[in-house]
Amino acid sequence: MSEAQKNHPLDSIAGIQPVRAIGGTLALAGFTIALLCGLHAGNPVETIVFRSLGSMACCLIMGLIAGRFCDVAITEYMTTYLRSQDVPQSDMDVIDLALQLQQERYGGQNLDNSTNAKDIAEIVN
């Protein structure tokens, strides 16, 4: 696995990759639906299991493809969004940004910046 793949922001959702999670979920859903439909139709057990496994394989492939499309779309959106945002370069930039947002939220009221800055600095550190 390359370094870029290891540091991908979407790699870890509860320790699994989203592409695999989507593919696996779709595969299990396909297996379950085929199994229940086969039982409902009254087919022999061997036929039900064989068709369910085939359905699971097809759904896995379709799920991996769909998961990859989702992964690319989300990654592109996140990259575009993060590039459009101002990323603070230091803790003081974070504090200034927080104070600016707080002043905007409270309609320009005269806020005690020294107290707020100390509180925010404690949270940041």
Image: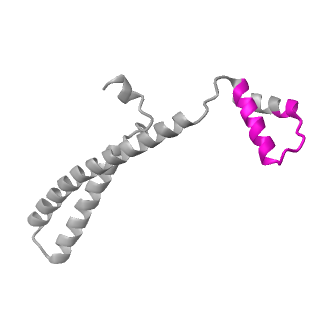
**At 31% from the left edge and 44% from the top edge, which residue is drawn?**
68
Q: Is residue 46 above or below residue 65?
A: below
Q: Is residue 5 above or below residue 48?
A: above
**At 21% from the left edge and 50% from the top edge, which residue is drawn?**
61
Q: Nearer the viewer, residue 55 or 77?
A: 77
Q: Is residue 51 left or right of residue 105?
A: left
> x%, y% of residue 60?
23, 51
The type of colouring in the image is one colour
Residues shaded magenta: 92-116
**At 40% from the left edge and 36% from the top edge, which residue is drawn?**
11
* Residue 111 inside the magenta-drawn segment: yes
Q: Is residue 83 left or right of residue 40?
A: right
Q: Is residue 125 visible?
A: no
When asked about the image quadrant of residue 58, the answer is bottom left
Q: Is residue 7 left or right of residue 118?
A: left
- In the current view of this chain or complex, which residue is farthest to the bottom? 41
Q: Quadrant of the C terminus?
A: top right
* Residue 81 inside the magenta-drawn segment: no
Q: Nearer the viewer, residue 26 or 75?
A: 75
Q: Nearer the viewer, residue 59 or 65?
A: 65
Tag count = 0
When asked about the image quadrant of residue 56, the answer is bottom left
> x%, y% of residue 1?
30, 26
The dominant secondary structure in magenta is: helix
When asked about the image quadrant of residue 12, the answer is top left
Q: Is residue 12 left or right of residue 52?
A: right
> x%, y% of residue 78?
48, 40
**At 9% from the left edge and 70% from the top edge, which residue is drawn?**
44
Q: Is residue 72 above or below residue 26?
A: above
> x%, y% of residue 18?
37, 44
Q: Is residue 98 visible?
A: yes
